[in-house]
Image (spheres, rainbow, N blue to C red):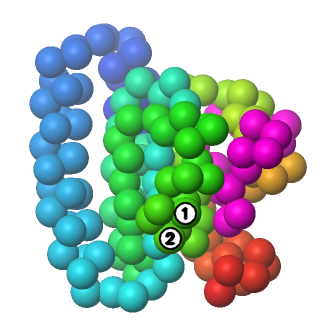
Amino acid sequence: MINALEARWQETPDVAARRAFEALLRSQVGIRLHYANQATRGPLVLLTPRPGEPGPLWVLLAALLASEQGYRVQLFDQGLPLDALPRAVSRLHASMVLFAGGRIPAAALTLPDGAAPSVPVGLCGPEPGEPHDERVHQLGDDLPRAVAKLRPLLRESGVL
């Protein structure tokens, strides 16, 4: 669904329609996350677009799916600078970081030395290829499957 929308908007740019849809989705997902986060004690996923990512579609839908799977979600709909990750993880007591999006190549996501968070870092989106950084786990472009990989990743990393 996201890939089809992104392709359509690349063929026939309609900035007003895109921004209106994103605003509607942001408000609906935000409401859902607010109440779901209060109702669960699951691990907290800090969810952010890949740095430089132009739109929030992937992040919003990933947030919704993660919330439905019992995770608490802290959503940033603008990219978080990579060197700010450790402080954000610490302040929010996040169990993991998940980057979502598709326009920025996976290889471009390299965590700065000494600034990698102490929790697992995942990446989901349609861009093929593996990140150059072995600390970043490629979860794929199928959002339900990517979210299903979070719990095993958390267990493997000793967070759960």
Q: Quadrant of the C terminus?
A: bottom right
Q: Is residue 117 magenta?
A: yes
> Horizontally, is 153 left or right of 48 in the view?
right
Closer-to-camera residue (110/13)? 110
Quadrant of the rendered image containing residue 7: top left
Q: Mark number for residue 93? A: 2
Residue 144 seen in the current view: no
Q: Mark number for residue 125? A: none
Q: Is residue 8 above or below residue 119?
A: above
> Horizontally, is 104 left or right of 11 in the view?
right
Which span is picked out in magenta? 112-133
Q: Is residue 12 above or below residue 59?
A: above
Amino acid type of the residue tagged 2 in the rendering: His
Amino acid type of the residue tagged 1 in the rendering: Ser
**In the image, residue 153 lies at what x, y percent?**
71, 73
Closer-to-camera residue (91/156)? 91
Residue drawn at (47%, 62%), measured in percent from left and top? 91
For marks 2 and 1, give the CA distance: 5 Å
Q: Is residue 123 above or below residue 78?
A: below
Q: Is residue 128 magenta?
A: yes
Q: Mark number for residue 90? A: 1
